[in-house]
Amino acid sequence: EDKVVQSPLSLVVHEGDTVTLNCSYEVTNFRSLLWYKQEKKAPTFLFMLTSSGIEKKSGRLSSILDKKELFSILNITATQTGDSAVYLCSPSGGSNYKLTFGKGTLLTVNP
Amino acid sequence: DVKVTQSSRYLVKRTGEKVFLECVQDMDHENMFWYRQDPGLGLRLIYFSYDVKMKEKGDIPEGYSVSREKKERFSLILESASTNQTSMYLCASSLVSYEQYFGPGTRLTVT
């Protein structure tokens, strides 16, 4: 059975802080790992990682994958209140494009 | 821009009723998915479809069925709604990559 564990489950920081969100996984025939941000509505796509050690960046957000140790991290620097959301990690495996989602990390950024 | 729409944002039904949740995507995606999201349990896959008239069970298919008669439309059916099916239901679609695009969600309450 595929497993995804995200930590911490929740986090409260002040604007300007840097945060690191963790995701460890066990997935049969791993193909890629995706990060999503979910505010009040539907999850929105952030990153897809397929190769170890290659950092993906988008503004203040960055993410990296370690396929040997089976984990990924999502970094957010200089956090803003608009970063407050649930961040979901989702590894995929097999051939049917099915994703397994972690329970998410609830990030709250206070002004 | 990919657009995934769901037929209702909020729905209230009585126990035992048959419930239809509809999802439509406008980007010619092969793959479509139905999830439910509950506090503390995260996103869980109910059913998915990788082609018209094709369907596969996800992690929690019991009490649900699906229909995909046209490529752009994927319906989730609760044959006899029960209170434990009160939840947020999210539909998603994807092309050949693993990046899934989500609809806005339907919050279903079964009384």
Image (spheres, grey):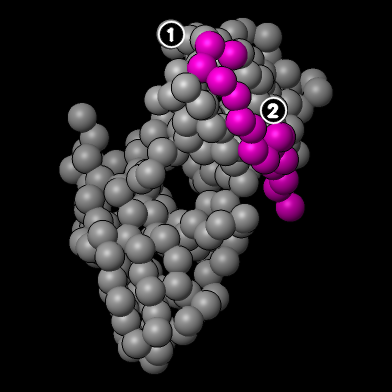
Gap in angstroms between the C-alphas marked 2 and 1 = 19 Å
Q: Position of residue B93 (x, y in %)?
A: 35, 45
Q: Earlier in the sequence, mark 2 or mark 1?
A: 2
Disc 2: which residue = A22
Identify the residue at horizontal 74%, vertical 52% (top origin): A1
Identify the residue at horizontal 70%, vertical 35% (top origin): A8
Residue B44 is at least partly visible in this image: no
Residue that extends furthest to the front in the rendered view of this protein: A111
Residue that extends furthest to the right in the rendered view of this protein: A69
- Please give left or right for residue A17 compared with residue B90 in the image: right
- Please give left or right for residue B67 compared with residue A23 in the image: left
Disc 1: which residue = A59
Q: Nearer the viewer, residue B47 or A106?
A: A106
* Protein chain holding label 2: A
Identify the residue at horizontal 61%, vertical 56% (top origin): B41
Q: Position of residue A86 (x, y in %)?
A: 52, 38
Q: Nearer the viewer, residue B42 or A48?
A: B42
Is A92 situated above or below B6? above
Q: Amino acid at mark 2?
A: Asn
Picture disc at residue B108: none
Element under disc 1: loop
